[in-house]
Amino acid sequence: TQLLEQSPQFLSIQEGENLTVYCNSSSVFSSLQWYRQEPGEGPVLLVTVVTGGEVKKLKRLTFQFGDARKDSSLHITAAQTGDTGLYLCAGLNTGGFKTIFGAGTRLFVKA
Amino acid sequence: DAGVIQSPRHEVTEMGQEVTLRCKPISGHNSLFWYRQTMMRGLELLIYFNNNVPIDDSGMPEDRFSAKMPNASFSTLKIQPSEPRDSAVYFCASSLSAGDGYTFGSGTRLTVV
């Protein structure tokens, strides 16, 4: 069974601080996605990474896919209160159709 | 595009009643997924359709759960009879194909009392 472990589970920081959240597995994934979910809404896709070692930037967010395509990280620079939410990583299995979600990192950014 | 549309947004029902959740995927998306989210278990895949055909229903908890996709623009998830442990938020998501990123609906919060 493929599992994705996210850490930390919960993070509370002050506005302006930097942070990194991690997504780890012992399995190889075809691709990995990051989503952000706000209360009362469904997850919203932020990025998809496909190539081992790939780095993608989305404004203050930097996403990296591990060389072996087993892990990923999300780094947020100068966090803002609007970054508050549940961050989910999701890996597409090598069979190509089943996406496994991690349990998420709940981020709270204080003003 | 209005995105993935789910109804109802909230459902409160008594144990033993039938519950039907509805989903309209994004037009042109060939893959549709039903997920269940709880604090304890996170997001769990229940069933996946490709071109209206169920491909993987291994996540459906038991025979009380059934899902249909009669056409490309509509899917239902039915629970009969419902039980308190079915209380969760149920999400429908669609994508262009199975390997693409998903667009989620806003979910249906189900409470079975």
Image (cartoon, coloured by chain):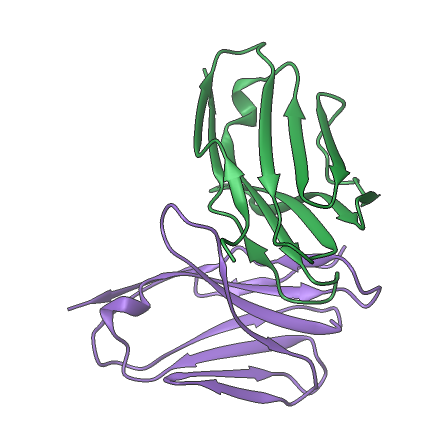
Chain colours: A purple, B green
- Position in image of residue A108 (x %, y %): 28, 62
- Front residue of this view, candidates A89 and B55: B55
Dividing the picture into quadrants, the one containing residue B68 is top right
For the point 52% across and 44% down, the residue is B5
Please, is residue B20 above or below residue B101 in the view? above
Q: How many marks?
A: 0
Please, is residue A60 above or below residue B39 in the view? below
- Front residue of this view, candidates B42 and B68: B68
Q: Tell me the quadrant of the picture where the C terminus of chain B can be found.
A: top left
Residue at the extreme left? A111
- Position in image of residue A86 (x %, y %): 41, 59
- Front residue of this view, candidates B107 and A111: B107
For the point 15% across and 69% down, the residue is A111
- Position in image of residue A31 (x %, y %): 70, 74
Please, is residue A76 above or below residue B112 in the view? below
B46 sits left or right of A97 in the view:
left
For the point 72% across and 65% down, the residue is A92
- Position in image of residue B2 (x %, y %): 49, 53
